[in-house]
Image (cartoon, rainbow, N blue to C red):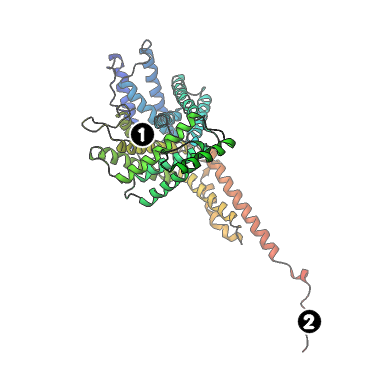
């Protein structure tokens, strides 16, 4: 990715003007994302997108006989596409072809890391598979609107991701429905233990709890012939275990050798990892402390963004995190993190740093996938309506209101938002931002919920007020 330390082919003199233009476009995109005094405008983003595509066409004309060449032009071009992709999300064009670029780049990183790790859950693959299908749909929809140069590039990148995903699915195809939950639990524990290892204070009790869960899983897996360590019991104990296993396998088929190896290796890795982190207790070797602190800081910032995404995230901000992570990832040598003297990391530092790197990419993936197809300019209104809808649904869930008066604050807020529309559109200056349909639909849902709650309250109030004529005259006082 951007400014990668990898060696690049020297620049062809004919490509120098293209590089200069791309550097200028990248600078404009960076300034656009940094300017918080105004919203990112669709017109500005689309104009810069057209300029980038014009440079791509020139590069393709020059490289008719050297399609696979990679030099600094490609590095800066990748930066431009990444920024434009995130800018398309910022202006609400989340479901259009250019917005797919940043998503695919992140998915490619995630899949490569899953393949490197060997252990991953079915949910990981299902989520990525679903999103890849959606991305293909956005590309197909954009065939009439966007440059074939961009669409061809995106199609090729998606195909690479699909091939990696197919390999990952095949690697787990031997797991039976009976063993799958146990495998997923072991993956979850391994990740949780890695997370414990990055806390400011090492959580001894939590780690011991995970160790207890591992021991329980180890016992559950023994009848399948899956053992973390060789048995050290007496001959009688071993004989009893063998008889128990024989009885179990009569009604449960022996797992495939591949599934047995996967589970046994994962179980052993968990136990070894518990022992290692208990020994280290979060202490990172000084040679890798700087990169650890950097990755920890990125992970923490992305987690904060995940909590406040709707109110504080401008999608173009993710580029800074992507860029830093890509640099760190590409600086590894044969998968190993290297210190200043070129020495590879020990297993403890290696796994801890990989956890932080992978977790950060996963958070970026989550933030991109969760991006609403609403322009940054309309997000304040959209977020207010989302909050109102949640409040109204909660009121309905709790039994409604006792009087229509209780709905006045909601009605006043909804009317004030509705009054912002000009000819049915939410305008920001002279621009009609993306996401009109989403905001209008949300507003309609809120009005409908408020209307239902008001009717229920009025019906309830009418039922409680029975006319005096229906109950008959007051009885005569009884003489005493």
Counting other residues with Cα less than 10 Å from the Cα at mark 1, is it few (<14), some (14-19), or many (20 or more)? many
Residue 103 found in image quarter: top left
Residue 224's x, y, as percent? Answer: 51, 36
Mark number displayed over residue 169 = none
Q: CA distance from mark 2 to mark 1?
A: 86 Å
* Number of the front mark, 2 or 1: 1
Looking at the image, which residue sits at the far bottom?
A: 480
Residue 148's x, y, as percent? Answer: 46, 19
Q: What residue appears at the point 78 percent right and 81 percent down from the top-left corner?
A: 476
Q: Is residue 218 above or below residue 326?
A: below
In the picture, measured across the screen, residue 125 lies left or right of residue 71, that is right
The quarter of the image holding the C terminus is bottom right
278 and 66: which one is in front? 278
Residue underneath mark 1: 322
Residue underneath mark 2: 476
422 and 238: which one is in front? 238
267 and 461: which one is in front? 267
Q: Can the viewer see residue 355?
A: yes
Q: Is residue 195 above or below residue 392?
A: above
Residue 365 found in image quarter: top left
Secondary structure found at label 1: helix
Residue 219's x, y, as percent? Answer: 48, 43
Looking at the image, which residue sits at the far left?
A: 341
Residue 57's x, y, as percent? Answer: 40, 17
Secondary structure found at label 2: loop
In the picture, measured across the screen, residue 407 lies left or right of residue 113, that is right
127 and 277: which one is in front? 277
Q: What residue appears at the point 38 percent right and 52 percent down from the top-left corner?
A: 205
């Amino acid at each position: 990715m951007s400014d990668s330390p990898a060696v690049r082919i020297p620049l062809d003199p004919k490509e120098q003007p293209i590089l200069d233009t791309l550097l200028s476009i990248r600078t404009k995109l960076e300034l656009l994302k940094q300017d918080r005094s105004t919203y990112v405008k669709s017109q500005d983003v689309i104009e810069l997108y057209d300029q980038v595509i014009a440079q791509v066409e020139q590069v393709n004309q020059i490289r008719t006989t050297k399609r696979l060449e990679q030099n600094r032009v490609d590095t800066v071009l990748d930066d431009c596409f990444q920024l434009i992709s995130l800018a398309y999300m910022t202006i609400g064009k989340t479901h259009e072809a250019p917005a797919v670029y940043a998503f695919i780049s992140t998915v490619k990183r995630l899949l490569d890391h899953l393949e490197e790790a060997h252990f991953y859950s079915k949910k990981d693959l299902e989520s990525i598979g679903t999103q890849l299908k959606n991305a293909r749909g956005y590309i197909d929809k954009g065939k009439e609107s966007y440059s074939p140069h961009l669409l061809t590039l995106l199609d090729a990148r998606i195909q690479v991701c699909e091939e990696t995903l197919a390999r990952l699915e095949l690697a787990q195809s031997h797991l039976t429905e009976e063993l799958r939950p146990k495998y997923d639990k072991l993956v979850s524990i391994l990740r949780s233990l890695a997370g414990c290892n990055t806390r400011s204070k090492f959580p001894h009790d939590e780690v011991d709890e995970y160790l207890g869960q591992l021991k329980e899983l180890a016992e559950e897996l023994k009848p399948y012939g899956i053992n973390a360590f060789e048995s050290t019991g007496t001959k009688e104990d071993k004989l009893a275990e063998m008889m128990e296993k024989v009885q179990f396998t009569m009604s449960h088929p022996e797992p495939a050798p591949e599934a047995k190896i996967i589970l046994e290796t994962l179980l052993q890795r968990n136990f070894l990892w518990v022992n290692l982190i208990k020994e280290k207790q979060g202490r990172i070797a000084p040679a890798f402390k700087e990169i650890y602190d950097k990755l920890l800081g990125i992970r923490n910032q992305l987690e904060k963004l995940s909590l406040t995404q709707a109110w504080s995230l401008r999608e173009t901000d993710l580029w800074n995190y992507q860029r830093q992570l890509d640099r760190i990832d590409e600086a590894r040598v044969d998968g190993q993190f290297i210190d200043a003297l070129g020495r590879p990391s020990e297993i403890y530092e290696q796994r801890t740093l990989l956890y932080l790197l992978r977790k950060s990419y996963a958070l970026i993936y989550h933030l991109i996938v969760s991006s609403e197809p609403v322009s940054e300019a309309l997000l304040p209104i959209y977020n207010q309506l989302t909050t109102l809808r949640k409040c109204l649904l909660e009121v309905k869930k709790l039994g409604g209101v006792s009087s229509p008066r209780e709905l006045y604050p909601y009605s006043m807020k909804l009317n004030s938002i509705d009054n912002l529309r000009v000819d049915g559109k939410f305008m920001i200056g002279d621009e009609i931002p993306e996401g009109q349909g989403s905001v209008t639909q949300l507003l309609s849902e809120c009005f409908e919920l408020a209307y239902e709650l008001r009717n229920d309250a009025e019906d309830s109030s009418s039922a409680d007020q029975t006319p005096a004529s229906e109950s008959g005259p007051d009885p005569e006082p009884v003489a005493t």
